[in-house]
Image (cartoon, helix red, strand yellow):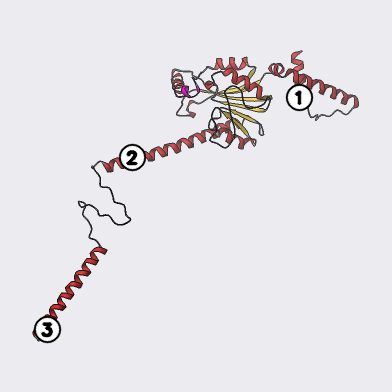
Amino acid sequence: MARNIFAYDTCLTISDFEVGHCVCQLSSQMFPRPLTILQRSRSYDGEPIARQPETVFDPIVGSAAGIIEGIQRRWARERRRRKVGRAYDMALEIARVIPRGSEVLDVGCGNGFIAHHLSAMLGASVVGIDLGDSADAPIDYRRYDGARFPAPDNSFDAVLLCYVLHHAQDVRVVLSDMRRVLRVGGLAVVYEDVPHSWWDRLVCNFHNRQWKNRTGPCTFRLESQWRALFNSFGFEISSERPLSRWRNLTHPVCRRFYMLKLRPQCLMRYLGPAVSREANVIRIEKSQQIDEGVLQSDHPRSSLFEISVQFSNIMS
């Protein structure tokens, strides 16, 4: 009897042991013991294996690379902000001297943001031309072949040349074409770098090295040289003023703003035949109205008549 009981107790003891062993194995699989930093991590299904650093400098290199990448992204974002903000400031400055509703041509528009901002300020579409295939801003962009503006004669009320003329390989071609596309009474707005001091010449030389492989060598001129050049193409300077060199900290050079108009003598020289014919027609119409006693002050071509009378007085 005792033997059976002993056997029975032994069987119960073994059974309890086996059950306890199975429970321990199951719990160890469900809840693995944490590893020390010296032990390699085990892979689990569907989980990536963490790469163990090969050297003690790997974490430092990874952190430095992340910091450098963040600085580069931040710098690119700040450059975009400065570029768009600087274009807005220039467009605001130009909008003060150009009448609202004027049709404007931006020669050498670059990224196109000056034209984009100016079109909103003037309430009219601004056309931008440059040597590239497209502009970053959503504007009416036309590709310029470097020889002739892609625009018909007498088609714009104002032309912008924002730091463009020193890039022109033949500045006479640009000024001649600007004179061609300007309407009677139109304006030309010119921004230019003027190398007054040795520092200005140093900055201009650095600018030339940056651009000579893309657009050719730059040609910078002094104020007297710009005046003589504008005058030789029939433009008179109606307004000019110096600009601060610190408006662009990455290009600190002396600058100048010019607002040009065509002299009446030059207008008569280039538009003389057409204006003369129009003037004769208007004179006949006005003389008939005077004879009939129905002279109208708001004649549809009265402005052109006044211009033709002025030209006639000048030429006589």
The residue at the point 73 percent across, 18 percent down is 272
Residue 28 in view: yes
**Sequence order check: which comes first, mark 3 or mark 2?**
3
**Sequence order check: which comes first, mark 1 or mark 2?**
2
In the figure, residue 241 lies in which quadrant? top right
| Other residues around mark 3 within 10 Å, as few (<14) / some (14–19) / many (≥20) | few
Which residue type does callout 3 highlight? Ile
Foreground disc of the pair 1, 2? 2
Which residue type does callout 2 highlight? Ala
- Residue matched to label 1: 304
The residue at the point 21 percent across, 67 percent down is 24
Q: Which mark is residue 5?
A: 3
Asked which secondary structure carries label 1, the reply is: helix
State the predominant SS element of the stretch in magenta. Answer: helix
**Extent of the magenta region:** 211-215
Residue 237 in view: no
- Residue matched to label 2: 65
